[in-house]
Image (cartoon, rainbow, N blue to C red):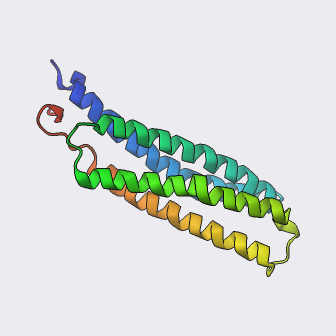
Amino acid sequence: MSAIFKLACLRAGAVRLSLALVLALLVVPGDVVAPVLFVNLNSQAQAGHLAGIIFHIANRGILILLLAIAMFWWKRCAGRRRWMMLGAVACLVATNEFLLAPIMETLKSAMGSIDALPPGDPQRAAFGMWHGISAVLDLLATLVSIILVALGWSGSGKDRCKP
């Protein structure tokens, strides 16, 4: 049977594609979409609202992809380091999605439109602090994902894809 149709090769390709999609979903919303929204929309509040929706969708997609990768790796020789990095990305994204995003949403609803607040306003500063923490977590998840993509699949024995 041709190597391209081997189950191990299909699994390896699915893992590589899933890891690349995770990386893309971490990079594109924050580094491509959000800056375009903030430059082209008239209101920071409107741009932030749309960016928040996009981040929410991307984070959920990332978590689903990480679950799929874990299922591909289950009972396979993925290696302890890869499992730890996969768990780290999942924890960072989940923290952003389920802990920090609700805090920022609460702050946004309490302060109203951020456009109406003066630059030195304490509510604006608090939102900026949580936004900064979220950005750092996103950056860390991106860096770990880059390493995971670079490492790729590491099957052994019957799980190794050999041409």
- Left or right: 156, with 82 as reference point: left
Percent across and percent down for residue 129 are 65, 73
Vertical comparison of 7 with 141: above or below = above
Of residues 102 and 64, the one nearer the viewer is 102
Q: How many marks?
A: 0
How far across and down, in percent of the image, does residue 148 sit? 33, 52
Residue 105 horizontal side relative to residue 83, left or right: right
Front residue of this view, candidates 115 and 71: 71
- Please identify the quarter of the rendering in which residue 5 is found: top left
Residue 161 lies left or right of residue 47; in this view the side is left
Q: Is residue 129 visible?
A: yes
Residue at image point 42% right, 39% down = 67
Check the image and report above or below for 84 versus 61. Answer: below
Residue drawn 59% across the image and 52% down it: 98
Estimate the x, y position of residue 64 in percent, counting from the top left: 48, 39
Q: Residue 78 versus residue 9: which sits nearer the camera?
A: 78
Q: Please state which of residues 145 and 86 is positioned toward the viewer in this rendering.
A: 86
Q: Quadrant of residue 74?
A: top left
